[in-house]
Image (cartoon, rainbow, N blue to C red):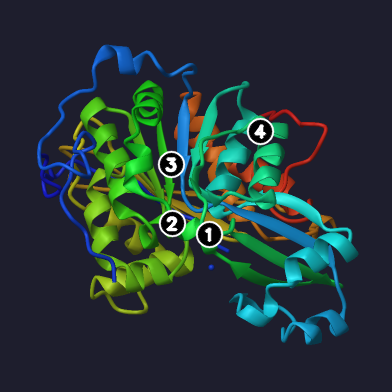
Amino acid sequence: MLSTRCVSTRPRIFAVRSSPSLLLRPFSPFFSPSSSLSLGPLPSPIRKMATKSFKLLCLENPLLDIQGAGDHAMLEKYGLKLNDTLLAEPHQMGLYDDLIQNRNAKLIPGGAAQNTARGAQYMLPPDSVWYIGCVGDDEYAKILREKCKEEGLHVEYRVDPTTPTGKCGVIITDHHRTMCTHLAAANEYKLEHLLEPRIWSMVEATSVGFYVGGYHLTVCPPAAMALAKHAAETNKIFMLSLSAGFIPQFFKEPLAEILPYCDFVFGNENEAKTWAESQGRPSDISMQECAKLMAKLPKVNTKRPRVVIVTQGTDPTIVAVAEAGKEEVELKEYSVPVIDKNLINDTNGAGDAFAGGFCAGVVQGDPLEVCIKKGQWLARLSLQELGPAYPRPKQTYKA
């Protein structure tokens, strides 16, 4: 069984984006959940079960975003206030059907990493990206599959028949967004699904790498670690988003365990600062020092550097690159192209879009600067859409 403490002093690159009690047990990607014996590499007949080979796999917690125009009466009906962002309570469960039936709601596949997967696929050739997470056995899951299929994203959801599909109701009132989320099945992903022979054969066939949203560290850290270890063993790329400030604040152990496997780390200024403070650094630490600190963490796969990307809204994006054998961490800053405020429709999901564009660049083997520009380009498109969406007909990136 592989040790999760196998680390090296190879450099790491850490990226941060601007813009929301787990018990861990050792395991191997080839370790049966019901057995104490290592199964070893899967036999070749099982490997051949995979019908498609993708470039990138994304893992996190899928939601169906249900966005509709509302008013103050609707907010009052469900006990909500303007710009609330909260988890749904029992008296608010009727909101989702209300939005669909009475508010001409727009239905969008959501959840941060699913937004990123959709964004990467938007920029890449067909059948480049696939996504896994957990949904229920209901109409909402059917809609999620249909919407992802429309966007060319292949999904392999784990289905929990006892729990409804996760949803995020978004009430749009003028320029305000009030969000009420029912996580439900999104919280029920299990390692056993990832280790199913058909699914794991698809993992093995994924040629470039993996992207995991930090929210998944609240659900199933062993699944994220299985992908991280496989990436290190096969020299594939492993990318992680910090996702929210509470991840480094309250889920320090699973984050600390997975960071040594990360080739790219994404976060915004709040997430980067919260992580640095969790390491005992002062609250006035600069974003540059935050990025450098994370980039210099020990690293398992010494064949790749670590890149840390910190986004700061309209302020320059900070990138720290740590390479093995070099004492100094290379710092770079990339200005963010200005967008007319009148063109901004919704900032929800812009950070996910940035990561999606960046991942598309990684998949295509682009230089770091081009990956940044692709991320900024896709984020700019997303800002002009309603919710975490991308324009149709599809636009093509031009340098």
Residue beneath disc 3? 211
Foreground disc of the pair 3, 2: 2
Q: Which mark is residue 163?
A: 1
Asked if disc 1 and disc 4 are in contact, CB closer than 8 Å, the reply is no
Mark 1 or mark 4, earlier in chain = 4
In three-dimensional space, the C-alpha distance between marks 4 and 2, rounded to whole angstroms, equals 28 Å
Question: Which element carries disc 1, helix, strand or loop?
Answer: loop
Q: For the residue carrying disc 2, how many other residues have a C-alpha within 10 Å: few (<14), some (14-19), or many (20+)?
A: some
Mark 4 or mark 2, earlier in chain = 4
Amino acid type, mark 1: Thr
Question: Which element carries disc 3, helix, strand or loop?
Answer: strand
Q: For the residue carrying disc 1, how many other residues have a C-alpha within 10 Å: few (<14), some (14-19), or many (20+)?
A: some
In three-dimensional space, the C-alpha distance between marks 4 and 3, rounded to whole angstroms, equals 16 Å
Residue at the image point whose x is 27% and y is 27% from the top: 235
In three-dimensional space, the C-alpha distance between marks 1 and 4, rounded to whole angstroms, equals 30 Å
Locate residue 171: give its quadrant: bottom right
Residue beneath disc 2? 188
